[in-house]
Amino acid sequence: MPAPSVIFLVGFMGSGKTSIGRELASLLDVGFVDLDELITHHDGRTVSAIFAEDGELRFRERERAVLFKLESALATGAVIATGGGTFADPALRAWMLERGVAVWLDATLDAIERRVARDGSRPLFGDRAALEALHAQRRDAYSEAPMRFDTSATDPAAAALAIHRALSQRARG
Ligand code: S3P
């Protein structure tokens, strides 16, 4: 029997991790987990409230704890949409690379700025210069994912299909 699919979608804010993740999980017939949603569920507060009240460092501690709790859920396969900073943490990156296939959803900053509302729900979503700096800081980490897809010009369903196809090819060797 083939090993269950464990896919971590990684990449910058607004790259499509959640929307593509839902589609991909249904194509693979496995569960879908959105890490930010799970953090919110465990904590009882939104991501922006955690950032505002406790600071980024405490958010990162929660992110790490919630990710590690997923260990048993991975046994049956899952698509996990991570937060934009999750794969940038070396320990979390190593944990994910050991347990599944990481897929980097890459997109241009123009596409990202078109998609993401500046409504405060993403505390690190700053002005263009801030986004460029954060993106440059994380690029090398994201590029450690063995697969990369540019999602700038595709809708979530088409992107999920393309990723599904590439994963099947990869599994066949
Ligand atoms: C973050 C991205 C967010 C969320 C938090 C921090 C980041 O997730 O985890 O606001 O560090 O880039 P999305 O990438 O899903 O927006």
Image (cartoon, rainbow, N blue to C red):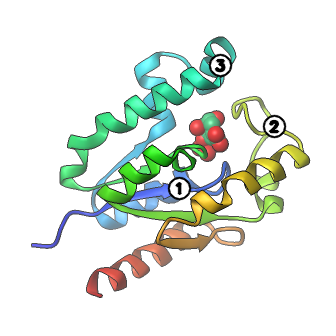
Distance Cα–Cα, label 2 vs label 1: 21 Å
Which image quadrant for residue 149?
A: bottom right
Residue, far top = 53
Q: Is residue 32 left or right of residue 103?
A: left
Q: Nearer the viewer, mark 2 or mark 1?
A: 1
Q: Which residue is mark 3?
A: 55
Q: Is residue 156 visible?
A: no
Earlier-in-chain disc, 2 versus 3: 3
Ligand 1 quarter of the rendering: top right
Badge 3 amino acid: Gly
Which dot marks residue 10? 1
Relative height, residue 33 to residue 107 (above, below) = above
Residue 23 percent coordinates (x, y): 45, 60
Given contact means CB atoms under 8 Å apart, are the residues at marks 2 and 3 in contact?
Answer: no
Circle 2 residues within 10 Å: few <14, some 14–19, many ≥20? few
Q: Residue at x 66, y 24 (%)?
A: 48
